Image (cartoon, rainbow, N blue to C red):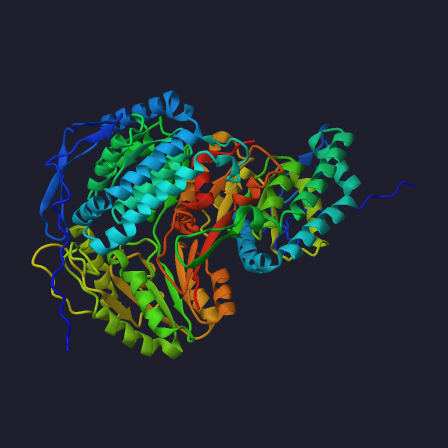
Amino acid sequence: MTFEYAPAPESRSIVTIKPKYGHFIDGKFVAGRNHFQTINPATEEVLSLIALGGASDVDKAVIAAQKAYTKTWSKLSGKDRGKYLYRIARILQERTREFAVLETLDNGKPIRETRDIDIPLVAAHFFYHAGWADKLDYAGLGRSPQPLGVAGQIIPWNFPLLMLAWKVAPALATGNTVVLKPAETTSLTALLFAQVCQEAELPDGVVNIVTGNGTTGTAIVNHPGIHKIAFTGSTEVGKSIARSVAGTSKKITLELGGKGANVVFDDAPIDETVEGIVNGIFFNQGHVCCAGSRLILQEGIAEELTKKLKTRMAKIRVGDPLDKNTDLGAINSSEQLAKIHELSAAGDAEGAERWSASCNFPDKGFWFAPTIFTGVTQAHRIAREEIFGPVLSVLTFRTPQEAIEKANNTPFGLSAGVWSEKGSQILWATQQLRAGIVWANTFNKFDPTSPFGGYKESGWGREGGKHGLASYLKEGK
Amino acid sequence: MERIEVKKTYKLFINGAFPRSESGRVFDVCNSKGELIAHPALASRKDLRDSVVAARAAQSGWAKATAYNRGQILYRIAEMLEGRTDQLATEISDSSGITLKKAHDEVFAAIDRWVWYAGWSDKLAAVYGATNPVAGPYYNFTIPEAQGVIAVAPKENFLAFIDAIAPIITSGNTVIALVPGSASIAAMTFAEVLATSDLPHGVINILTGSHDELAPWAASHMDIDGMDISGIDKKKRAELKIAGAENLKRIHNFESNMTPTRIFAFMEAKTVWHPIGV
């Protein structure tokens, strides 16, 4: 017997999308010269035209940010900076539904996630950092740690507004001003956030948003008026940014790729583990740098667990992201979909065994069914490269030492998972895993109080928690 | 009749042993009068690679040693160094041209550095760690861990060499020191201190020679996790950072000494989540 769900679409009438947007510089929206389309990846409908920022737009934004830094923001007390951030947090809470719908339209992720995870976490990040603004003396960075100046921030498309919050909230709390570039395919919530800054009466130029593509980002990275670069995105681009700023005094933080190992021991509670694996790889269509994309199973439970996992995967509801019952939304772009297809084809070609849940996709938009590959070896591309989609690679192990060796056999080191009922085994494994975040008997949990960031080629520095503040401050005395 | 002195051959210190450079090369170190003191080994790229293998093999064991144990071994280095004060002061004075009094002060400062860092090993987690009150039923904590294998290129000075290596190993990293020029003499005598300090083989490896030759190889080596380039000329730092970007090495330089910043710069914060429930 199959249960059918009646459609439960969230209304999109709450959002107003303008036909065309400019940049947000010095507290005002200014017209762009050239524009590109932003589409809804679930329908391919054109939502709006986004300005393509060039070097002169970036320059104007940096000048505005410098002026705001020297004239207003660095002169404000921490208490007053905090008050602006609290205001922003409260406005975001009030407008959660609007932001959630807009994010879902522009990104393709399900409304269940934008409504329950992305946007609430955004507000939480501002609220958390608001409280730090007048307490920086207690951040473990000496007395009176100092801001750096203008922060250039470049963010990805997978959690558009959340990544904005991870960057903007700590930068502002610590007294820096910001020039931010949202990802090419997901600019709309950042532009709506600009309105929130106006509504909060944030002084002009403290937050500047220049939309565009990779060349816009390069202009930010190379601008001599910027003192700090914060980037979230691919390891490849991260390395090129590291090279670009090598000869400068710019401080830099990087949150890059991952190939997270999710290690399951024989004694793991099987049903909870299956749920955790699903959340680890299919959350946000697998567009997650810390996704648990390598499932490493102890041989004794591999067969049973894989079977249960497939049964569970068959129940994942793929489709209209605005439908409140949808679990897995649209792939963010045709380019990303092509990359997922390419790597999955490599999995087939290299001899792994593919299984996908059967799905009825809408006629238009970009879709990929929840997929697992079994019989994966460490040499396979699907075990080494980040797929950034709903594709899970399954490997097996016999001894705990072997599990750790396989888990750590990657140049990445962002996240890892471990599943077991045995406390000492969990603590042992968390100690051995070379990753910045280890989720034990859970996966893909985030919180502003909890530092996030990677070992090895997954990046430099941390975001969130006490540790994240160090990325935006010079040590005091 | 005057006794004929037995002179020392200055070699390298790799994996607890004292090999000559694989290249067979040496260089001259002279005193301020221009008289030859010794021919230290001129380390090569191959020596660097051998050191990385040794440092990598030693790293997990050193990091797994208890913080108390690491602290005691660092303190033991201070004890052993104390007994070599006169010898090192003479070597430093001869090779660098400073007065014997100043050289003594430098050795005393080096000894005190080891005592200072010895006390840090079991306090890092308290100072740099955290428990994080997340908004949900999870226990969440952050602990600092050593990054792995770190190369250091200190200035041509004994104390700068100690300032570079001590913070690196305090946290459980292993280190390859690239010691330039005249500092090689005292550094290799210091290696004899290490050999009697219960320090596991491979935790500190010392190569003498030229920064210009060795530092670029270290920066591009894919199994080195970080570098302290405080002793590298400012104009030459960018090219090392560019080479190091290939594996996103953590590359730092420091202005000040005796600061935990020099320890934490080569540590990673690991955050662990676990559900709370019955």
From the top left corner, tell me how far across and down residue B91 is, in percent.
Answer: 74, 38
Which of these two is toward me, A150 or B208? A150
Work out which quarter of the rendered image holds the N terminus of chain B and state it. Answer: top right
From the top left corner, tell me how far across and down residue B41 is, in percent.
Answer: 63, 45
From the top left corner, tell me how far across and down residue B212 is, in percent.
Answer: 52, 37
Which of these two is toward me, B229 or A433? A433
Identify the residue shown where x is 48% and y is 36%.
A135
Which of these two is toward me, A2 or A382? A2
Q: Is residue A352 left or right of residue A367?
A: right
Whether residue A473 is visible, yes or no, is: yes
Whether residue A239 is visible, yes or no, is: no
Picture quarter containing residue A414? Answer: bottom left
Q: Residue furthest right?
A: B1
From the top left corner, tell me how far across and down residue A176 is, in percent.
Answer: 39, 31
Picture quarter containing residue A85? Answer: top left
Work out which quarter of the rendered image holds the C terminus of chain B and state it. Answer: bottom left
